[in-house]
Each structure stands twice: as structure tokens, then as C-alpha cells.
């Protein structure tokens, strides 16, 4: 394994990881005081609090990070919009504070420039369409502020799209939901289909003129969880040009973890905590439950099994990595924090993956997809019939 790890680190030095989803901004929001980068200085070791800091990103071979500007779905309307703006602000603060390590990235060219400079390209993705409050103008404002993908839903439906973990209402997208996708295509904002229902996945791929992404989802055929991607959807990615980025969340990669997580979440609810709460009090309750009820542990091999399957079904040109660090309380053994990516690459090398295929997985596929979305946007914007949409949900959905 020592030789494989050395080979993995050598590969990542040339073809670093583009990670599709990291929730450090929300984890910083959950701390007291929130967003205090003096107290929670990620230039040093923050392993007591977070999965992410700059030394461990460097050790992990990360070359580009989509920082999630997620807000919970119990924040709605203008409150969700303002909270998302605060999330964007802390990403900008981080980039400005650590210029030797981080570079703001808006385009594929920016990603390549950051790699050439030895810095980590920092992009933003909004996790959940509730953040735009059914406003295409707000969507455009988010894009102008640097958001380069939006996950259409989080764990709950939005009025115009169904989530994977809510009761279906729209059976995919409503007419306004289709307009959201078209406007994202016009802007060059990637349509992220993690968290959405399978019907929404299929509907969005039919409507989208640009490649889509799954910023942090694994294979449903390997672990039958609604958050994962069915094989027919994976098989549609080559025609669309998009990518599915495997996630590390145990309940999405290890079947035995699904039932345990349901029970653990119910325990947190019984103590007055949201299962997504990463604050100190919720963490203490979660740890106590785990001590009394040992959880099934995923491993690096568990994640590699998903990648083997996703490569077989979608093809090596249509897969990537989206760990979901700082957005989940549990992680696979060996992938405990952002320094763990070399272990995954070493595992895949041991399974016979070529260096060329691994370079696609870590860097090339994601950069190509960002560039393709930019190309589609330029083409649409050159059409005088395709100006900014001012449609409203009331007009289109009644």
C-alpha cells in the first residue's frame, strides 16, 4: 500500500481532485461565534471541529473545491436568500484571507490557472432551489456573485421540483422548474441533480441543453438509497455530457448503514436536534448514541465499489468525486477527512485503473463539464430570442 499511496500522490500532483461538494461554510455558520475565521483559522489544524482545513486539503491533493453555500430548508423565502448570501460571503472571506492557498474561480480557465499557480480553485455551489425563493432574478444575482451550480432541491421538495426524500408532487419538474433549468443553461450555471428524485433527474436531463452534474451522489444499484443515481440515469450521461461525482456519506454507499442512520436520526429528533445539526450539543448526543449502538463502517473499498460500477455504466468520462466533507457526521474509514483522497486513488490503482482514467476522474472530467456549460451559455446568449427570463411561478404553474 505504501507504493500505491506514493503513486497516488504523484498522480494527484499532476491531476488534483476537483471535489464537487464541501460544506465547510455551513459548519462555520454552526459554530459559536459563527463565521469567526480568527477563532477557526483553517490555515492550521482544525481536526477537532472540521473535516477540512488548508493543510489537509493540500495533503489530500485537492486542486479545486466547490464550496457548498447550503442553507437548511427550514429557512425559506427571503430568509433563505439572505442566509445563502451570508454563505457566499464567508467563501469570499476565506479566499481573500488565504490568497497563497485559494484562488476564486468562475470558469474552467480559472481552474486551470489555479492549478498552474499551485493554488486551490474555489468555486461555489448553491445546495437547494429553495435558496432562490422562486425568483429567476435571484438566480441571476447568485450567478453574478459567483455561484456556478445549483442543486435543484435539498431534502424537501421545492414548489417546482421533487426531492428524492420527499413525497412526489410535481412528478419531476413543473413548467417553472423547466424554466429554471433553461435559465441556468443560459447563464452557464451547472444543473446539479444530487438530492432530486429520479423523475426530476430524468426530466431535467431531457430539458437541459448543457451537461448536468451530480455533485455528491453514488450508485443506487450498489446501495439502494433514493439519494443515489439509478443505472438508467447514469447510462444517459454520455449523451448529455455530464458527470456523477461519487459521495462518501456512509448511508449512501453502505447498505447496512441505511437502517442504522434512520435510528440515529430518530434519536437526535427525540433530543430536539435536526440530524444535520453539526453543533457541539448535537454532536455529543450523536457520539453517545454511537457508543451505545456501534455503527456499520464503510471503507475506502466501499466507495471504490461505487466508482467501479459508475464507470461501467456511465463510462470513465462521466464520473468524478464529491466527498460531502463537513456535511455529514460520519465518513468511511480511511476517508475521515479531506486528506484521504490519495487512499481512494491508491485503491483504484490496485484495482487496475489506469493513470489516464484516474486523471479523468480527479480533474479532467469536471473541468471539461464546467467548460461545456460555458460554451452552451455563450451559444444561447448569442441568440437574440433568448434574453433573461422574467417568468414567474404564478404565470407558468398557476
Image (cartoon, helix red, strand yellow):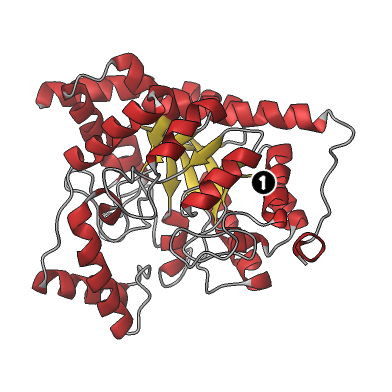
Left or right of 186 on screen, residue 218: left
Image quarter hosting the N terminus:
top left
Residue 110: in sight, yes or no?
no
Foreground pick, 124 / 387 = 387
In the picture, measured across the screen, residue 281 lies left or right of residue 67, that is: left
Please state the horizontal and vertical placement of residue 330, each as a whole percent of the image.
25, 58
Q: Quadrant of residue 395?
A: bottom right
The residue located at (11%, 70%) in the rendering is 291
Q: Is residue 161 above or below residue 181?
A: below
User: Which residue corresponds to the image point at 61% horizontal and 39% vertical from the top-left?
Assistant: 206
Question: Which residue is the site of mark 1?
Answer: 181
Q: Residues within 10 Å of mark 1 (few under 14, many from 20)?
A: many
Using the rendered image of the protein, determine whether residue 123 is visible from the camera's viewpoint: yes
Q: Nearer the viewer, residue 352 or 230?
A: 230
- What is the x, y in percent for residue 79? 63, 72
Number of numbered discs visible in the structure rendering:
1
Q: Residue at x 43, y 32 (%)?
A: 235
Quadrant assignment, res 374: top right
Does dot 1 land on a helix, a strand or a loop? helix
Q: Point out residue 220 in the picture as x, y percentages from the top left corner.
A: 33, 46
Q: Nearer the viewer, residue 286 or 136?
A: 136
Does residue 122 appear to the left or right of 235 in the view shown? right
* x, y percent for residue 18: 43, 34
Residue lying at 45% horizontally and 23% vertically, measured from the top left: 364
On-image quarter of the C terminus: bottom right
> Is residue 137 left or right of 232 when viewed as pictured?
right
Amino acid at each position: 500500500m505504501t507504493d500505491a499511496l506514493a503513486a497516488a500522490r504523484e498522480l494527484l500532483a499532476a491531476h488534483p481532485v476537483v471535489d464537487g461538494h464541501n460544506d465547510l461554510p455551513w459548519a462555520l455558520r454552526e459554530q459559536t461565534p459563527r463565521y469567526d475565521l480568527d477563532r477557526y483559522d483553517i490555515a492550521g489544524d482544525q481536526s477537532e471541529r472540521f473535516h477540512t482545513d488548508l493543510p489537509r486539503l493540500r495533503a489530500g491533493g485537492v486542486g479545486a473545491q466547490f464550496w457548498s453555500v447550503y442553507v437548511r430548508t427550514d429557512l425559506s423565502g427571503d430568509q433563505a436568500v439572505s442566509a445563502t448570501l451570508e454563505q457566499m460571503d464567508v467563501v469570499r472571506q476565506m479566499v481573500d484571507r488565504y490568497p497563497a492557498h485559494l484562488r476564486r474561480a468562475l470558469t474552467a480557465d480559472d481552474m486551470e490557472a489555479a492549478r498552474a499557480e499551485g493554488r486551490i480553485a474555489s468555486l461555489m455551489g448553491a445546495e437547494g432551489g429553495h435558496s432562490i425563493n422562486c425568483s429567476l432574478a435571484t438566480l441571476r444575482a447568485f450567478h453574478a456573485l459567483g455561484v456556478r451550480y445549483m442543486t435543484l432541491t435539498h431534502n424537501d421538495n421545492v414548489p417546482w421540483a421533487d426531492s428524492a426524500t420527499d413525497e412526489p408532487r410535481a412528478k419531476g419538474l413543473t413548467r417553472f422548474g423547466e424554466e429554471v433549468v433553461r435559465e441556468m443553461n443560459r447563464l452557464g450555471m451547472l444543473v446539479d441533480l444530487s438530492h432530486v428524485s429520479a423523475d426530476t433527474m430524468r426530466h431535467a436531463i431531457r430539458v437541459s441543453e448543457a451537461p448536468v452534474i451530480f455533485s455528491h451522489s453514488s450508485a443506487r444499484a450498489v446501495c439502494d438509497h433514493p439519494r443515489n443515481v439509478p443505472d438508467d440515469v447514469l447510462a444517459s450521461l454520455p449523451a448529455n455530457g455530464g458527470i456523477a461525482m461519487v459521495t462518501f456519506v456512509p448511508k449512501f454507499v453502505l447498505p447496512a448503514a441505511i437502517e442504522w442512520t434512520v435510528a440515529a436520526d430518530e434519536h437526535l429528533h427525540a433530543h430536539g436536534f435536526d440530524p444535520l445539526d453539526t453543533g457541539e450539543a448535537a454532536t455529543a448526543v450523536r457520539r453517545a448514541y454511537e457508543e451505545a449502538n456501534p455503527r456499520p463502517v464503510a471503507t475506502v473499498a466501499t466507495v471504490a465499489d461505487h466508482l467501479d460500477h459508475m464507470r461501467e455504466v456511465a463510462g470513465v468520462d462521466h464520473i468524478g468525486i464529491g466527498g460531502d466533507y463537513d456535511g455529514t457526521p460520519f465518513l468511511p474509514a480511511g476517508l475521515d477527512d479531506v486528506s484521504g483522497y490519495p487512499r481512494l486513488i491508491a485503491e483504484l490503482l490496485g484495482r487496475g485503473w489506469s493513470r489516464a482514467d484516474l486523471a479523468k476522474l480527479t480533474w479532467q472530467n469536471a473541468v471539461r463539464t464546467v467548460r461545456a456549460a460555458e460554451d452552451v451559455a455563450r451559444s444561447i446568449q448569442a441568440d437574440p430570442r433568448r434574453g433573461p427570463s422574467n417568468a414567474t411561478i404564478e404565470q407558468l404553474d398557476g
